C-alpha cells in the first residue's frame, strides 16, 4: 500500500508542477488545496499538502499515511475514479495476480475459520448429547443385585444411588 501512496503522491505533485504558476512548495500546496476545494469540493489544508510533499517527494519528513478520502480525492485530481482505480489501472499483471491471490487466501482463511467454529460447535453438541444420552444414571434390580443402566423409563428402574449400588445385595442366607 505504501508503494501506491508514494506513486500517487509523485503523480499528483508532478501534475501540480506542470500546471501551477507558483514555483515554491508552499505556493503549489496552496494551489492544490484551492483546486481540490473548487473542483472536487474536498477540503484539504495546504499545510497537510506540504507535509505530504516533504514526506513523499523530498523525504525531509516522516511519512504520514493520508486517510482513504484524501487518497480518493487526490486520485480524482489526476484523472482516476478513486485510489482503487489508480491502483488497478497502474498495476502490472504480476501485481494484479498477487492482489487477487492475496484476496483468495484471505477468503480461504475466513472459510477455514468459519468451518472450524461450526465443526467445534457440532462436535460439542454431539459430545454433549452422547454423554447425556449414554450416561448410565439409573439402576435396575438384576437377580441378586443392582446394575447401572441408561435411563429408559423401564418399570423397575430407579435413579442411580452409588451407595445402594455398591452395598445392596440380596441376602442368600448363610
Image (tube, rainbow, N blue to C red):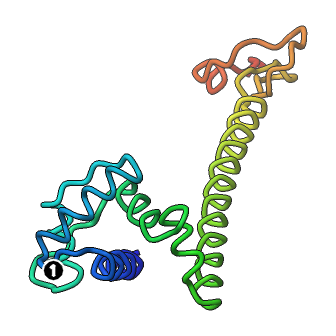
Quadrant of the snapshot with the C terminus: top right
Above or below for 105 versus 157: below
Above or below for 129 versus 109: above
In the rendered structure, the answer to whether residue 64 lies left or right of residue 159 reads: left
In the rendered structure, the answer to whether residue 125 lies left or right of residue 55 reads: right
Q: Residue at x 23, y 64 (%)?
A: 31
In the rendered structure, the answer to whether residue 54 lies left or right of residue 119 reads: left
Q: Residue at x 77, y 30 (%)?
A: 133
Q: Mark 1 falls on what kind of element? A: loop
How far across and down, in percent of the image, does residue 99 sit? Answer: 59, 77
Observer-nearest residue: 80 or 98? 80
How far across and down, in percent of the image, does residue 169 sit? Answer: 72, 21
Q: Furthest residue to the top? A: 155
Q: Residue at x 29, y 62 (%)?
A: 66
Q: Which quadrant of the structure image shows residue 20?
A: bottom left
Quadrant of the snapshot with the N terminus: bottom left
Neighbor class of circle 1 (other Cα within 10 Å; few <14, some 14-19, many 20+) is few
Q: Which quadrant of the structure image shows residue 35?
A: bottom left
Above or below for 112 versus 25: above
Number of marks in the rendered image: 1
Q: Residue at x 59, y 75 (%)?
A: 88
Q: Which residue is mark 1?
A: 23
Observer-nearest residue: 48 or 153? 48
How far across and down, in percent of the image, does residue 135 sit? Answer: 72, 32
Observer-nearest residue: 129 or 31? 31
How far across and down, in percent of the image, does residue 74 sit? Answer: 38, 64
Observer-nearest residue: 166 or 67? 67
Above or below for 88 versus 172: below
Amino acid at each position: 500500500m505504501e508503494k501506491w501512496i508514494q506513486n500517487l503522491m509523485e503523480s499528483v505533485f508532478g501534475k501540480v508542477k506542470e500546471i501551477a504558476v507558483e514555483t515554491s512548495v508552499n505556493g503549489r500546496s496552496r494551489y492544490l488545496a484551492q483546486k481540490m476545494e473548487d473542483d472536487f469540493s474536498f477540503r484539504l489544508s495546504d499545510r497537510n499538502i506540504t507535509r505530504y510533499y516533504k514526506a513523499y517527494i523530498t523525504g525531509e519528513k516522516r511519512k504520514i499515511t493520508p486517510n482513504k478520502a484524501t487518497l480518493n480525492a487526490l486520485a480524482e485530481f489526476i484523472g482516476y475514479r478513486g485510489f482503487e482505480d489508480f491502483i488497478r489501472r497502474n498495476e502490472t499483471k504480476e501485481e494484479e495476480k498477487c492482489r487477487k491471490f492475496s484476496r483468495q487466501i484471505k477468503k480461504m482463511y475466513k472459510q477455514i475459520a468459519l468451518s472450524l467454529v461450526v465443526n467445534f460447535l457440532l462436535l460439542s453438541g454431539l459430545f454433549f448429547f452422547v454423554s447425556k444420552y449414554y450416561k448410565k444414571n439409573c439402576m435396575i434390580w438384576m437377580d441378586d443385585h443392582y446394575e447401572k443402566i441408561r435411563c429408559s423409563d423401564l418399570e423397575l428402574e430407579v435413579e442411580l444411588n452409588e451407595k445402594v449400588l455398591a452395598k445392596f445385595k440380596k441376602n442368600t442366607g448363610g
